Amino acid sequence: MSSARTTFEMGLREYVRTPVLLALLVFLPAYFIAVFTRVMPEQTVPVAVAGETVPVGMKAVVAALMTPMAAALVGGIAGLFLMRSAREADTRLSIVGASVPELLAARGGVLTVAAVVASLVATAVMTVTYVPEHLEWFVAATVLAGLLYGSLGALVGLVFNRLAGVYVLMFGPLLDIFLAQNPLSTETHAVAPYLPGHYPTELAFDAAFTASVDPATLLWGIAYLVGVAALTGLAFRRALQVG
């Protein structure tokens, strides 16, 4: 797996040398969560979590919703930029002997680092406003959101150019997590359970506001992630063959 390690290290160095990605990694989560929670009124609203309706402060609800969304935004854009910038390099590496699994492992490793860092930054900002009941489960939910949209971002990068991909990955998490999965919505969207943000958002709210968390939610989310990653892997293999 020396090729995978070398490619992983090259990917990390390229990420660090990209100012836009570094700014997104730290600034975007902090901006989204801090600004949106600051402008929310001090009032209590009924929120449906774990099959029950509980009264929760508006600022805490918005913080719990914006945190996985910020991780999803960062993960998606990171996946897009990583795939777009690495396509030519990966084609050359495959020609000189690097296997597709090694390249996928290296790119997946870089995405995982970006998702974890973005999730930790977002959760740290959130704790200024509200500390979840189960912090470790909440972090898992935000990492899951980042990885799901990171994989989708890589897939989008194989299909669209950079500008179109950025639009897709900016509006995608907003429509998914902020609108379709929003627990404050008066009606449930029919497609909400099938969208990438469903399991991360459900897990995040259970971890933030309930006394216990059902591990099955995380397992379903991981299964969804495996499916998206497999689809991205197939698309990546085909792109290398065509290239």
Image: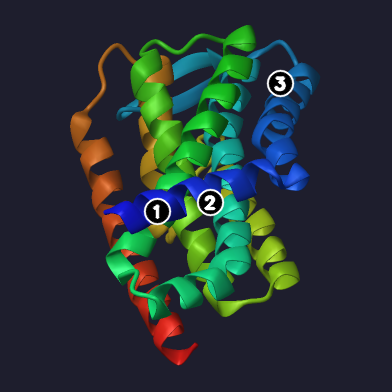
Name the kind of residue labelled 1 in the image.
Ala
Spot occupied by residue 31 in the image (x, y as percentages of width and height): 75, 29
Spot occupied by residue 146 in the image (x, y as percentages of width and height): 48, 43
What residue does disc 2 label?
11
Local crowd at mark 2 within 10 Å, few (<14), some, or many (≥20)?
Answer: many
Q: Earlier in the sequence, mark 1 or mark 2?
A: 2
Q: Is residue 26 above or below residue 182?
A: above
Give the residue displayed 57% in from the left and 40% down from the top.
Answer: 69
Name the kind of residue labelled 3 in the image.
Thr
- Kindly identify which numbered label has been placed on residue 17: none
Name the kind of residue labelled 2 in the image.
Gly
Give the residue displayed 36% in from the left and 13% down from the top.
Answer: 134
Local crowd at mark 3 within 10 Å, few (<14), some, or many (≥20)?
Answer: many
What residue does disc 3 label?
37
* Label 2 close to label 3 by CB (< 8 Å): no
Which quarter of the figure has residue 203? top left
Which quarter of the figure has residue 133? top left
Give the residue displayed 59% in from the left and 44% down from the top.
Answer: 13
- The quadrant of the image that shows the N terminus is bottom left
Q: How is the image coloured?
A: rainbow
Which quarter of the figure has residue 128? top right
| CA–CA distance in space, label 1 to label 2 | 8 Å
- Kindly identify which numbered label has been placed on residue 106: 1
Given residues 64 and 238, the one toward you in this image is 238
SS label for mark 1: helix
Give the residue displayed 24% in from the left and 46% down from the top.
Answer: 220
* Label 1 close to label 2 by CB (< 8 Å): yes
SS label for mark 3: helix
